[in-house]
Image (tube, grey):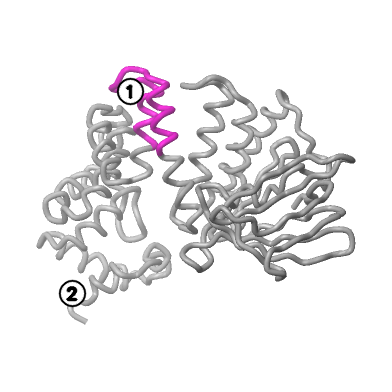
């Protein structure tokens, strides 16, 4: 292979860090030679690899923060398409004073984090909130930090629901939980804080199933610490294995954001199971649904949800089938502790169930 072919092979290797660890000294020499020569020729791929080799060091190159910084500054000229990435990394270099003996340059950090945030880099957005919280280069403004974190939460929450694995919902939910718990930029609200900690816990456990990263366990520990702090201030029944609700929690959640749902029914011994999925233009929407009952410490994300109507006394599905569509429901209390739940689609009634309540099992 010529130098360019080798460079492309290195650059396109998604596990390059691990590959470098297993290379022989001769292979590392070849890597060093190709990267340094082509970086001197201002080849963007080589400059990027070298910049991140120097950023903390690698098996091929020792840590050199100054060289890493200078390469990243050059890359803004030679590969402007990735300006957001360079700016995000430069922000960290200046924030932690990597090139100045640990003395931060918050002005430069703020400048580059602002640029990284403009390009949508979560880490830059997160650090801007930190700077407002700590009054670093900018005036201390807890409310501004809270508003920034809320915006990042919304973006990551939507990405999580859509199945995007490159989101950071666990970290940002942890931050919001702590803000509500401590009253940072917002009134103290341990109930809302508890909900954010539950979201964070669900997200971090899913992330831990997908990949190993040593920081994940630390995040999980902090989330559970936050939950315990909430439980000192609010009443949550965490011992019950089952609970009931006057409304179908799954269906109620699935109908949020003006979705149409398809409900399939199955008659069981003492209940009616209702399995619901969101629909999008006639096909199932591949989007998670949050279902929660905070007073029982229950929160789950599912693409399909199940509700169990307990002791149904009336089951009527218009059209006589075992499934129906709905875009809204109404719940009417009846005598004897019964409730009538009517389902509607485009203004027409599609089903009615009369039952006592709805039952759920803790996961």
Label disc, if present, on residue 182 of the rendered structure? none
Q: In this view, does 142 lie to the left or right of 196?
A: left
Q: Dot 1, how many residues are within 10 Å of its Cα: few (below 14), some (14-19), or many (20+)? A: some
> Which residue shows up at 76% across the image and 28% down it?
235
> Distance from label 1 to label 2 (Cα)?
45 Å
Q: In this view, does 360 lie to the left or right of 151?
A: right
Extreme bottom residue here?
1
Q: Is residue 342 above or below residue 123?
A: below
Sequence-wise, the earlier of marks 1 and 2 is 2
Q: Dot 2, how many residues are within 10 Å of its Cα: few (below 14), some (14-19), or many (20+)? A: some
Whole-percent x, y for residue 21 in the image: 41, 64
Q: Which tag is nearer the camera, tag 1 or tag 2?
A: 1
Q: Is residue 46 above or below residue 258?
A: below
Whole-percent x, y for residue 109 in the image: 27, 33
> Which residue shows up at 18% across the image and 74% down it?
3
Residue 112 figure quarter = top left
Q: Does the magenta stretch include residue 112?
A: no
In the foreground, 84 or 54:
84
User: Contact (CB < 8 A) between labels 1 and 2?
Assistant: no
Q: Is residue 288 left or right of residue 122?
A: right
Extreme top residue here?
139
Q: Assign a secondary structure to mark 1.
A: loop
Would you name the residue on which mark 2 appears? 3
Whole-percent x, y for residue 247 in the image: 72, 44
> Which residue shows up at 77% across the image and 50% down it?
362
Q: In this view, does 340 lie above or below 61?
A: above
Label disc, if present, on residue 136 of the rendered structure? 1
The magenta segment is 126-151
Whole-percent x, y for residue 155 in the image: 42, 45
Quadrant occupied by the N terminus: bottom left
Q: Is residue 130 magenta?
A: yes
> Which residue shows up at 72% across the image and 60% down it?
274
């Amino acid at each position: 292979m010529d130098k360019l072919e080798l460079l492309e092979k290195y650059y396109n290797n998604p596990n390059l860090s691990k590959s470098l660890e297993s290379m022989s000294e001769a292979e590392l020499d070849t890597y060093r030679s190709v990267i340094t020569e082509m970086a001197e020729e201002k080849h963007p791929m080589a400059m990027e690899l070298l910049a991140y080799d120097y950023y903390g060091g690698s098996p091929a190159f020792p840590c050199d923060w100054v060289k890493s910084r200078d390469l990243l500054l050059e890359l803004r000229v030679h590969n402007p398409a990735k300006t957001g990435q360079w700016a995000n990394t430069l922000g960290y270099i200046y924030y932690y004073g990597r090139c100045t003996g640990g003395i931060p340059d918050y002005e430069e950090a703020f400048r580059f984090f602002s640029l990284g945030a403009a390009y949508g880099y979560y880490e830059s957005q997160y650090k801007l909130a930190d700077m407002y919280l700590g009054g670093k280069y900018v005036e201390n403004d807890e409310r501004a930090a809270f508003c920034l974190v809320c915006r990042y939460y919304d973006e990551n929450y939507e990405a999580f629901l859509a199945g995007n694995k490159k989101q950071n919902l666990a970290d940002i939910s942890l931050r919001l939980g702590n803000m509500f718990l401590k009253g940072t930029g917002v009134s103290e609200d341990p109930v809302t804080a508890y909900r954010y900690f539950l979201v964070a816990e669900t997200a971090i456990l899913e992330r831990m199933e997908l990949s190993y990263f040593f920081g994940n366990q630390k995040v999980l520990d902090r989330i559970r610490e936050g939950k315990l702090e909430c439980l000192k201030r609010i009443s949550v029944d965490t011992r019950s294995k089952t609970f009931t609700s006057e409304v179908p929690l799954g269906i109620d959640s699935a109908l949020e954001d003006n979705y149409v749902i398809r409900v399939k029914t199955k008659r069981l011994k003492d209940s009616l199971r209702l399995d619901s999925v969101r629909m999008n233009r006639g096909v199932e929407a591949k989007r998670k649904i949050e279902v929660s009952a905070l007073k029982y410490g229950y929160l789950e994300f599912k693409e399909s949800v199940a509700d169990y109507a307990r002791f149904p006394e009336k089951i009527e599905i218009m059209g006589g089938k075992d499934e129906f569509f709905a875009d809204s429901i109404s719940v009417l209390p009846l005598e004897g502790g019964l409730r009538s739940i009517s389902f509607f689609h485009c203004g027409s009634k599609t089903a009615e169930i009369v039952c006592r309540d709805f039952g759920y099992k803790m996961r």
